[in-house]
Each structure stands twice: as C-alpha cells, then as structure tokens.
Image: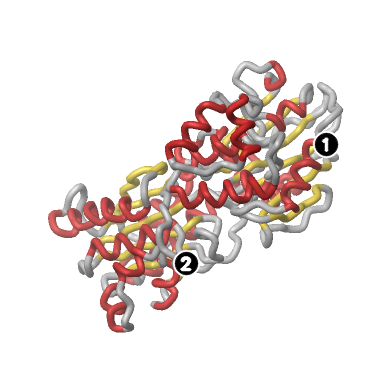
Amino acid sequence: MTSAPLASLAPRELLGRMFAAAVNAAQPEHCIPPHLPEPPRGRTLVIGAGKASAAMAQALERHWPGPLSGLVVTRYGYAVPCERIEIVEAAHPVPDAAGQAAAARLLELVRGLSADDLVICLVSGGGSALLPLPGDGVTLADKQAINRALLASGATIAEMNCVRRHLSAIKGGRLAAACHPARVVNLLISDVPGDNPMDIASGPTVADPTTCADALEIVRRYGLDLPEGARRLLESGAGETVKPGDARLAGVTTRLVATPQMALEAAAAVARDAGVTPLVLGDSIEGEARDVGKVLAGIALQVHRHGQPLPAPCVLLSGGETTVTVRGKGRGGRNVEFLLALAVALDGAPGIHAVAGDTDGVDGQEEIAGAFATPCTLKRAWERGIRPRDRLDDNDGHGFFEALGDSLVTGPTMTNVNDFRAILIT
C-alpha cells in the first residue's frame, strides 16, 4: 500500500492505516499458503483452536491440493465458511461448555491415526480459553473461576498459561501426544511476547518444560485461591504435561506463520511511505499497561523536546502483551489502559498522537479493538466533566475513550498478533 505524504494525511488517518497494515500482515490468506507441508500417503486431518483458526482453516482449504477433513474451534463471531473442515464456536476469554465439548471431540478425532497420516494443527491466540478440557478432579466451573482470577491478577501471559497447561487434559503437548504416530505440522500465529510456541494457546501440540511446581509457585505469587480439585492436581504432580524428548512428539514440526514483529514491520513500511521515520521499540513489551504508558510517554516527550533518540516526524511502534491488575469497576482493557495512562503522562503535549489496539479486534472483554489519543484528549474530557485520572483509577479506559468518540472499532479481524501501539510525533 502506498501512503500519501504526512502533510496530506491527518495523524489519526495515518495511525489508522498503520494499524490496518499490521492486521493485514497477519491475515491467514497471506501467511498460511507458504508454510503448507507436502500431502501425506495417508489421511490429512486438520485440527486447531484460536481466534484466527477458522480463517486459517479457510485459507488452508483454498490452497490444499488433496482431500482433508477436520475440526477447529474459534471465538463466537469469528467463524467463516469452510467446506471440509467443521468450525465450532465457543467463549473467550472465559471458557464455556461449547469449548469443553469441542476440546473433547478434538482428542477423540485424532485417536487411531497411523504413521502415514498427517495432522495440520492451526493454532492462534485465544486457544487457551477455547480448549477448556479440565484435568482430573477439575470442573469447568473451576476453570472459569481460575481464568477470571488469572485475568484480574496482573500475571503475565506466560504465567497464566503455565497454570492453565497443568490443569488441562489437552494442553501442554497432550493433543500432539494423542496424534502419535501420525506426523504433526503446527502452523502458529503468535500472540505472545517472545513467540514461544508453548505459550500460544497454552501449547496443546508442543512440549512443555515447566512443571506443576512452577504452576503452584505462580498461584502463590499472585495469591490465587484455587478450588480443591485443582490444587490437588498440582500438588500431586498428576497434572504434569508432556516434556521435551517425549517419543510421542518426535514427529512434530512447528512453523510460526505470523508474529507481532511482522505486523510492526508492515506498519513501519506505511510510516516510511508517508515520510515518517519509524522506530520499533520492541515486539514483546510486557508489564502493567499504565506503567508502560508512562514510560513510552517519557520517550515521546524526549523526541518532542530534544529530537532524541530521533527527530520528528517519527512514530514509535511497539507490540507485546501488557497486563492490568484490576482494582476498579470500569470497562477496561490493557490497550485503552495503556493509552489513557499515556495521555495523562503527556498532559496535552502538542504534536503527539497515538493509537493502541488489539489486533484481534477485542481489547479486554469489549468488542472494541482500542482507541486513539490526541493532544486534546484531556482537554476534551475535562470539558465533558470527565476526570481522566479517576477513570484510570477505575480501570475505565473503554468508558473514557467511548465518551470522547475515540474508540477504535474493527469487528472481528480473523487474526491475532497481540497488541499494537503507535505514537506519532509530528
């Protein structure tokens, strides 16, 4: 895509184009075909889970040269038409019975395969909640309560997924082990900092070096109150996952088909076309969203005041997955929490605009991707009787930006490479 020069583009339009380019770079229709394996002598079975898994299945169907069948589970509203692969919808981020039933069906589907068969596993972010098959002694209600507690705890995605893997009957390599002796090719769209396959959907088809003891330490660290069955599963060691070196995983190949870095590079290309210098700060930035907002505001102000580390016009790009420790009762998400904290820290500094959004189109539990911030954000809020710091304290980022008409609403994007942040200094 060729952009117009900055002088002819409003900052909000340029930021919107960068966000769109980031999402487009991770669309399954573009990133699945180059990574398809050779057809097998036996059957081809497609399985998967995640917000992008249905679109991945559709792309695979369009480009696969032979027969295939299968089942993938995606978030409600994210299904797309497929002819040979069944698409099931379930709840995210808090799991439901539909996801539990789909996970059980996936395990049953892969049993009895031969060494001549091929399993193509399509996994993207959101798969943890969409495959909520509890381990022994753990109920779906337990999984729902644990998921809610983890989401509100401030734990990193790696920490959350460590706990989830050890309370599951399908994650942590268990689904791949059930496929043995068939060959397994994992096609993954990464939504996690560092792109570690075991953290993408809690790694249902890859080995897991972490342990039940690690999961218990995370539970202790965040003061989580585990249901009795879940605690017993971890303390007994019965929840151990499939470890590296397990012979059942010898035929597993993993390919990352889209990552946050690819999305950032696509956005950077849009900026350069518009005459704006991009600076990618990192694709795996973590931490409390409001703290990250303060830090990036400091960098933006250094550019604005001193032309360091580079002069304007420029854009600071970053990805990753921040966290929010929920203390208020507002309508929040990590991207709008970041953006509100950024706006407060910038305090109306001129010439600084920003966008922050989740590339799957859903920030937190709202059907809103994120929002835009401008030098006038705080002034416009005060004029409406809205106190920005109070809204931040109440974790009410969505309520704040929606009241200003600055929400970023995309609908389901059919992909997910996690958070996207762009701070434009003109």
Q: Position of residue 16 (x, y in %)?
A: 43, 65
Q: CA distance from mark 2 to mark 1?
A: 39 Å
Q: Is residue 187 visible?
A: no
Q: Position of residue 86 (x, y in %)?
A: 80, 50
What residue does disc 1 label?
A: 108
The residue carrying pointer 2 sits among few (fewer than 14), some (14 to 19) or many (20 or more) residues within 10 Å by Cα, namely: some
Is the image coloured rainbow, by chain, by secondary structure, or in one colour? secondary structure
Amino acid type, callout 1 = Glu
Q: Is residue 87 visible?
A: yes
Q: Which image quarter: residue 382?
A: bottom left
The residue carrying pointer 1 sits among few (fewer than 14), some (14 to 19) or many (20 or more) residues within 10 Å by Cα, namely: few
For mark 1, give the secondary structure: helix
Say above or below: 384 vs 274.
Answer: below
Q: Residue at x 29, y 65 (%)?
A: 343
For mark 2, give the secondary structure: loop
What residue does disc 2 label?
A: 331
Q: Which image quarter: residue 354?
A: bottom left
Residue sticking out furthest to the left: 306
Q: Residue at x 37, y 46 (%)?
A: 287
Amino acid type, callout 2 = Arg
Drawn side of residue 415 relative to residue 8, left or right: right
Circle nearer the N terminus (2, 1): 1
Q: Position of residue 391 (x, y in %)?
A: 36, 69
Drawn side of residue 342 relative to residue 99, left or right: left
Residue sticking out furthest to the front: 228
Residue nearest the observer in this picture, 12 or 420? 420
Say above or below: 238 vs 52.
Answer: above
Residue nearest the observer in this picture, 62 or 135? 135
